[in-house]
Amino acid sequence: MQHGNAPASPLVGRVALLGAALVVATLGLGARQVAPSAPTTTTTAGSGTPATAPARGRLLVFSKTASFRHQSIPDGIKAIKDLLGDRYDVDATEDSAVFTADNLARYRAVIFLSTTGDILNDEQQKAFQGYIAAGGGYAGVHAAADTEHTWPWYGDLVGAYFKTHPNIQPALVRVEDRSHRSTRMLPAEWRRTDEWYVYNRNPRGRVKVLANLDDSTIEGATMGGDHPIAWYHEFEGGRSWYTGGGHTSESYTEDLFRKHLEGGILWAAGAADTAPQDAERVPSGAAPK
């Protein structure tokens, strides 16, 4: 029988050393901080300055009707989304409850797409007036002029109210301002088919007329030889653009009308415009010949 400690075997020693090494390595790894990956940035060519994606604006398409309803409304909504969805988030609704100060402040422009009748209550009207006063944009399409007949402020915003119309028929539209972004792509004489409104007053003098109808080419629609059909104006701090076209579903498949609509909404939204503006223009206040 042997007394005292027996010498350790070489195998046990190697195991002990290996375990110690593993403990040290583990502690070292736990103490080391992993550096976060650097954020990915892009630079503007030639500038060396980081480029940031521009913030997308929002547009509101409002198509509530309280009297006549146009079958072309879904076509108009689709066209607006197709034309502007690459630059804006486009919301479409018929719920007038969205007309609150906080909600409207989210939008660059509000498009009244063939709305009809009395569609906003007193509080909603107040919110919309505040939105325009704060620099908001309004674009009215066709029956937007057949809306809120008992609200004088709205009549001044849109420019004129719908009064009557003849049957759908072809007509000659004379484009008198071809420098505006909603008309610069149009020919001076633009022939197209639509339902042509007669208004309760001539808006010329209150607004800047873009195009007018040649009454001699229409049966049953006359405004005494000066018949504005598209116009725009700055109004109480905001912007207002209107086109009388857009009754028919076919309007929203016409290339020129689509470009006209797109340009008008962009102007109402206050979008930057870098295109040349050297087209012909009838002197301000002058009726077309």
Image (spheres, grey):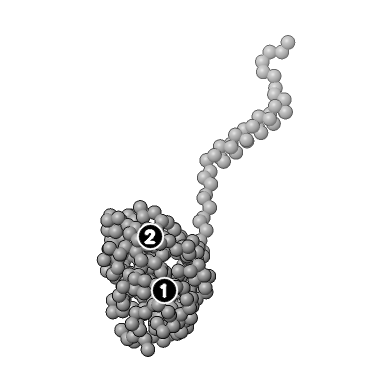
Quadrant in the picture for the N terminus = top right
Check whether the beta carbons of the residues at disc 1 and disc 2 lie within 8 A of each other. no
**Residue 166, x across and y down, in percent:** 41, 74
Where is residue 133 shown, x and y percent of the image? 28, 65
The residue that mark 1 highlights is: 166
Q: Is residue 181 visible?
A: no
- Quadrant assignment, res 120: bottom left
185 or 244, nearer to the observer? 244
Instruction: Establish if 31 lies above or below 61.
Output: above
Quarter in which the C terminus is drawn: bottom left
Residue at 52%, 58% (x, y): give it: 40
Q: Among all residues in the image, which is located at the extreme top?
A: 1
The residue shown at (31%, 77%) is 202
Q: Residues within 10 Å of mark 1 (few under 14, many from 20)?
A: some
**Circle 2 SS class:** loop
Instruction: Residue at 50%, 67% (x, y): give it.
Output: 249
In this picture, residue 26 sits left or right of residue 58: right
Residue at label 2?
Answer: 67
